[in-house]
């Protein structure tokens, strides 16, 4: 199976400081992969590199969806990538956009709809909300939704472009327990309903990693600490090194791992 992401020999500096060190990583198309690490481990910088917003030093190879950076129109490539970030919550503002209007704004890359949508776009938006069990949010204003409901709308918005790769960049970071579980159920449904979609889930919370994410990458101080199959890297010894804590893992009945310090 071809790669969705291929990174070789990537070293990246920001403001004169090296943030990523010798990154070599591959994700197959259709794979569900997690990226785990503490604050400052380099997770979001890695995403910015995948999106072409930050560039590694000369000599690196970055290839996304079969297109090699330096030879590709990044704006065109980004239309095939859905990036759901908690920063988007902050961009919602106090405008009275409805859930449907937010979803319809996806192809435009705007936060909110500033044009008259076509009938086929409206139908697709409704279909996406229905597939995420969120049709009831179509007429609700975004500012009246819970954080978990807003994330559902943002995921539907991202899917409007029919992406081949979706990056969920710490989507539960601002959510309470109920909102987090609401979101994780949505991600689980998405993984089940769209087997062709490559999913990358970024988190600093071990318990957020659903069993659907069978491969992973663990970062520490901008370096790859471990990568590979879920069961081989989500171990107490590896996590102790990743977080500098004596973490004990307790398996849950639903396949998730819970932590005790």
Image: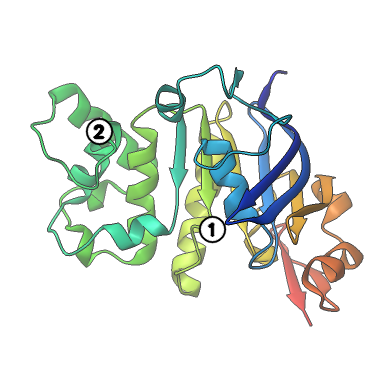
In x, y percent, where is residue 110?
A: 24, 42
In x, y percent, where is residue 127?
A: 30, 33
In x, y percent, where is residue 47?
A: 57, 45
Structural crowding at the residue carrying mark 2, measured as other residues with C-alpha within 10 Å and reported as few (<14), some (14–19) or many (≥20): some
Tell me: 160 left or right of 144: right
In this view, 164 is above or below 18:
above
* Quadrant for the N terminus in the image: top right
Mark 2 vs 1, N-terminal side: 2
Q: Which residue is denoted by mark 1 in the rendering?
A: 170
Query: Which of 60 and 190 lies nearest the eye of the viewer?
Result: 60
* Quadrant for the C terminus in the image: bottom right
Q: Residue at x 55, y 16 (%)?
A: 71
In x, y percent, where is residue 77?
A: 46, 24
Residue that lies at the very extreme toward the right in this rendered image: 237
Q: CA distance from mark 2 to mark 1?
A: 23 Å
Q: Residue at x 86, y 78 (%)?
A: 246
Tell me: 74 left or right of 12: left
Q: Which residue is denoted by mark 2 in the rendering?
A: 108
**In the rendered image, is residue 170 in sight?**
yes
Residue 151 found in image quarter: bottom left
**In the rendered image, is residue 212 in sight?**
no
Tell me: 242 left or right of 204: right
In this view, 197 is above or below 98:
above
The mark tally for this picture is 2
Q: Residue at x 56, y 47 (%)?
A: 188
Query: Which of 89 and 198 lies nearest the eye of the viewer?
Result: 89
Disc 2 to disc 1: CB gap under 8 Å: no
- The tag on residue 10 is none
Secondary element at image label 1 = loop
Residue that lies at the very extreme toward the bottom in this rendered image: 261
Residue that lies at the very extreme toward the left in this rendered image: 116
């Amino acid at each position: 199976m071809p790669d969705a992401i291929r990174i070789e020999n990537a070293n990246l500096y920001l403001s004169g400081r090296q943030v990523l060190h010798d990154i070599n990583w591959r994700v197959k198309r259709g794979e569900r992969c997690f990226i785990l690490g503490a604050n400052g481990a380099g997770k979001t910088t890695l995403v910015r590199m995948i999106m072409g917003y930050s560039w590694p030093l000369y000599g690196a190879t970055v290839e996304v969806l079969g297109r090699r950076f330096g030879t590709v129109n990044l704006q065109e490539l980004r239309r095939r990538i859905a990036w759901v970030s908690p920063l988007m919550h902050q961009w919602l503002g106090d405008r009275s956009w409805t859930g449907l209007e937010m979803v319809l704004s996806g192809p435009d890359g705007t936060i909110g709809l500033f044009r008259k949508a076509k009938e086929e776009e409206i139908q697709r938006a409704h279909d996406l909300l229905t597939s995420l069990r969120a049709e009831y949010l179509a007429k609700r204003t975004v500012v009246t939704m819970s954080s978990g409901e807003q994330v559902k709308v943002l995921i539907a918005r991202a899917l409007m472009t029919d992406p081949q790769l979706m990056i969920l960049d710490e989507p539960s970071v601002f959510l309470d327990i109920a909102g987090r579980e609401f979101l994780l159920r949505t991600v689980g449904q998405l993984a089940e309903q769209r087997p062709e979609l490559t999913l990358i889930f970024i988190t600093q919370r071990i318990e957020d990693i659903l069993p659907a994410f069978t491969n992973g990458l663990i970062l520490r101080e901008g370096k790859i600490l471990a990568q590979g199959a879920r069961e081989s890297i989500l171990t107490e010894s590896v996590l102790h090194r990743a977080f500098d804590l004596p973490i004990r893992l307790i398996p849950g009945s639903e396949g998730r791992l819970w932590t005790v310090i």
